Amino acid sequence: MSDLRSLLPRTWYAFLARHPRPRPIQARSAEPILAGRAVLLASATASGKTEAYAAPLVERWLEDMRAGRLRVLVVSPTRALVNDLARRLEIPLRRCGVRIQRRTGDHPRPLEGSQAGILLTTPESLDSLLARHARHLGAVRAVVLDELHVLEGNARGDQLRILLERLDRVVGALGGPPPQRLAATATLGRASEVARRFLGEEATLVQVDSSRDLRMQIRNPGAPEELAGLLLEACTESGARKVLAFVPSRADAEDLAIALSGRPPFHSAVKVHHGSLSRQERERVEETLLRASAALCLTTPTLEVGIDVGDVDLVVLLGPPPDVTSFLQRIGRGNRREGVCQVLGLARSPGEAARFAHLAECARAGRLLAPARPFRSSVLVQQAFSLLFQNPHRLLTGAALSARLPADLASRFGPERCEELLEHLCGPEWLLPAGSGRFGPGARLHQLFERGRIHHNLEAEGPEQDRVEVLDEQTGRVLGHVHRDSQGHLPQEISLAGKRRRIVADHGRQIRSRSAGVGRAEFRSRGSAEISVELAQDLARFLGVPGTALPTVRKGGRLLVGHFLGSARARLLREVLRDSIGEGAGAGPFLAWLPRQAEWPAELSAAGFRRMLSRRSRSLARSLGAGPWATALPRDWLLEDLEALADPQGAAQALEGRHLVPADPELAEVLAGLLPSHLEPLEGLD
């Protein structure tokens, strides 16, 4: 402690004195951060990473920050995490005489005249700042990527990599050195590789093993109506007073909250937390959980990372998470001050029970099975639009776009190739040629920029015009939102914020409701979570599936075939099966299903998968996660991206030489339990 205190003479008290001793991540990271090195801090949830980067950065730039100069930029994945960080940092920063500011869609206060030394933002708001107010970022000397594992491997992470390069250019143009880059993460596979990709070749990895013992029970609730009772019984048996229960969907959260509300031991302290609730409603729930001594919160992955909800006695998982990282994140929210994670896994089938056991084995062994994901070219479309508006003359060239890319991407997307993209985007909607290889904005692009719609790489839930804001009739409080169906209708009764509600007034984009009725929650799905090929194949190993076998079982009028290809490859298989067999055929990440009399295709080749990819490129772009701007790409660019994401060659090789083999009775039960819930057959195993 004395060594760390001497390294941080001006900030130690404000950030670290309240702890009996420094956390390992804090002791090991201070020196390289103070030396100005690029550092990735990797340790478990609630291990003190925020203080580990904040205290040295404030120590390093304290005088400048006190003078009102913006020196540190923290980029966090969500607005909720930005708000949570602001709450946690406000007191220690005030002790240091440093101001903090949030800049998100919820907090759009301008930077003009700000005296903040630290700015908290999201990737989308950073994109907007660079496009509209880049000069205000010229004083930044350090940038922190908080909760990096949430962004790594998706289109938002690809966007963030380019934003970092753009920030370097802005700071350099205004006479400053490239900002020091830092990142913090809890559970991240391929940590060294990710550190180099986001922070540079010379990045330092400070990784602390903060693993705790895992004490996990797996129970089968039986019938759906028994689920609420089993959950309460488990809470009572364990003596848990504060419980965080992760559920698969927003509808599950609402339905369970209604079933549990008023029942002991939680009575009225049953809360829900998900993305369809309003910001105000989510913050009310977070504040309640932080201060409550006893409560049960039913949540989707919105509470998986970062947000402090206080000490949680028990984590409940209704169904297995999609991967080991998510599993560790969720169980890491509980028993943070103890050496043991108390977890209850509610498995609704033998398949889910097997997946729970497999995830627990991987977690204990430290095998994250993290996939290597390719860069999505669609992000270049979005970044081209954003960069165009950063130029005061509203002009862009291929060379300018290429120059703002990280080195590995600039070598792949040189000036000529970037100009090819800009030429493809020419038309009345997007870009207009302005001569000499320059391009200006078209009418629609101008309109989207004015509305702030060009700064994101987030997939929309559905058409915006179908989204309806829900207000409480008595208080006028915005509770959240729901969506109309394809005919524009809403049910008269819904459930939201843990209560059944009756619609009393429909004003188009807004409805008023009161507590009443027997309605059920209906929400737009964002699609199923991705299962990597690495995890799917390891599950096959865990189940003892021979490498030459495609285990089969007949159930409910279907032939089930265990392929364990993972989500992306399975989407290609699904399309091929539907083309060759027709209605009733499909595939998920672990198994395929065929009508009872159908036969497994004799040949599944890479060429066949590629032809399918070419024919269905537009429909597959969304399901494969190619990014919301993917359909604006040149066709050959889109196909190149889809092939990298779906890997038709790998899918064919994984199936080559494997034969249909009847599964033994135990494996047959597991396979049948891996069937998606909406396809669960009525009949038993044959």
Image (cartoon, rainbow, N blue to C red):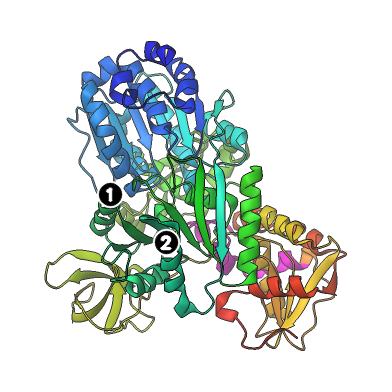
The stretch of residues the image draws in magenta is 608-635
Residue 71, above or below 408: above
Residue 487, above or below 659: below
Main SS class of the magenta portion in the image: helix
**Tag count in the figure?**
2
* Residue found at x 31% / y 43%: 84
* Residue found at x 46% / y 65%: 526
Answer with left or right where residue 608 lies relative to residue 535. Answer: right
Residue, far left: 474
Q: Earlier in the sequence, mark 2 or mark 1?
A: 1
Q: Give yes or no for residue 624 being in the magenta stretch.
A: yes
Q: Residue 267's spot in the image, x, y percent?
A: 28, 67
Q: Is residue 639 visible?
A: no
**Where does label 1 land, which residue?**
105
* Residue found at x 33% / y 12%: 9
Image quadrant holding the C terminus, namely bottom right
Q: Is there CB contact under 8 Å for labels 2 and 1?
A: no
Q: CA distance from mark 2 to mark 1?
A: 38 Å
Residue type at the position of mark 2:
Cys
| Quarter location, residue 69 | top left
Residue 682, above or below 99: below
**Where does label 2 land, which residue?**
235
**Viewer-proximal residue among 199 and 397:** 199
Q: Residue 408's spot in the image, x, y percent?
A: 60, 35
